[in-house]
Amino acid sequence: MDNRAKGIMKIKGGIRSYSVLFSFGILAGILCRLTDFFPYESLWSLPSIATLFGFWIASVSLITYCSSSNCGAFWGSFLYMFGMTVSFYTLKFILGFFWEQFSGEFPTALFLAYSVMALVCGIGSYILYFWNKKALFSSLLCALPASGILAEAIACLIVLWKQKMLLGQTIFDCIFAVIFGVLLYWKAKSRLLFFLTLVIATGIVFFLIYRPYLL
């Protein structure tokens, strides 16, 4: 582990730590749902934080970076994302009694789908934690968070330029792409492999996911 990581407060396993992460997830889900009171088709497009993946990637990557074991990374990310899912869809159901835009039955199918996604995020976090290994493949893992966020940032910049939307998400993605790029650059064993993976993975994610989805 590099010297910079030693100064980062680590998440220790245990009921208390996992309860805190679950609670943070619930809070994040509530905040994401409340952005639906703002218009999506506007300059800031605040609801995009709940519909795009940058916030998910940043959250899971940060939990992984601060975890002290693979299992801790798995449970921390899973419980955070599951808490977010629970509050996001539960609050929609509650708000439906007061605002027509949220009305309807509880979205069971979406809730189950994103609960599975929370599990996938936990597994991804478990795998990403191997970036702490002093092995060549760890450099590849180090580049993945920044790659995913950077791909979204590029897509958001294009949308911002053409449609004058997604300013908030663009700023968020640019900031966290730099943060994870710098943090994990110093952790990577091979700087060359890190940069190669960053470029290739960014291109793949952009063309396979964000270009057909956003552009």
Image (cartoon, rainbow, N blue to C red):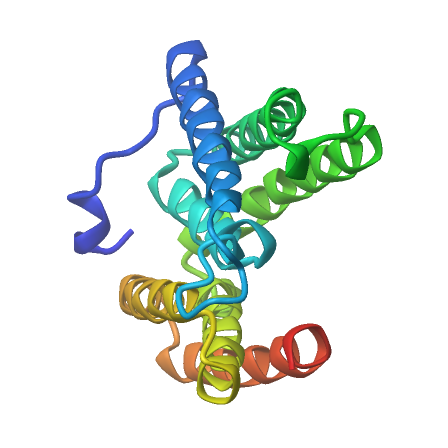
Depth check, front residue: 145 or 94: 94
Residue 109 x, y percent position in the rendering: 84, 34
Residue 97 x, y percent position in the rendering: 65, 20
Query: For the point 67% across and 83% down, which residue is it?
Result: 207
Q: Where is 24 relative to 60, above or below? A: above
On screen, residue 215 versus residue 54, left or right, reads right
Query: For the point 78% across and 29% down, which residue is it?
Result: 104
Query: For the point 29% across and 51% down, which residue is it?
Result: 1
**Where does the C terminus fall, quadrant-wise?**
bottom right
On screen, residue 210 versus residue 84, left or right, reads right
On screen, residue 95 versus residue 64, left or right, reads right
Q: Where is 91 relative to 65, above or below? A: above
Depth check, front residue: 6 or 83: 83
Residue 164 x, y percent position in the rendering: 45, 80
Give the farthest residue toward the right: 109
Give the farthest residue toward the top: 15
Query: For the point 53% across and 68% down, which residue is it?
Result: 148
Q: Where is 19 relative to 8, above or below? A: above
Residue 53 x, y percent position in the rendering: 56, 57
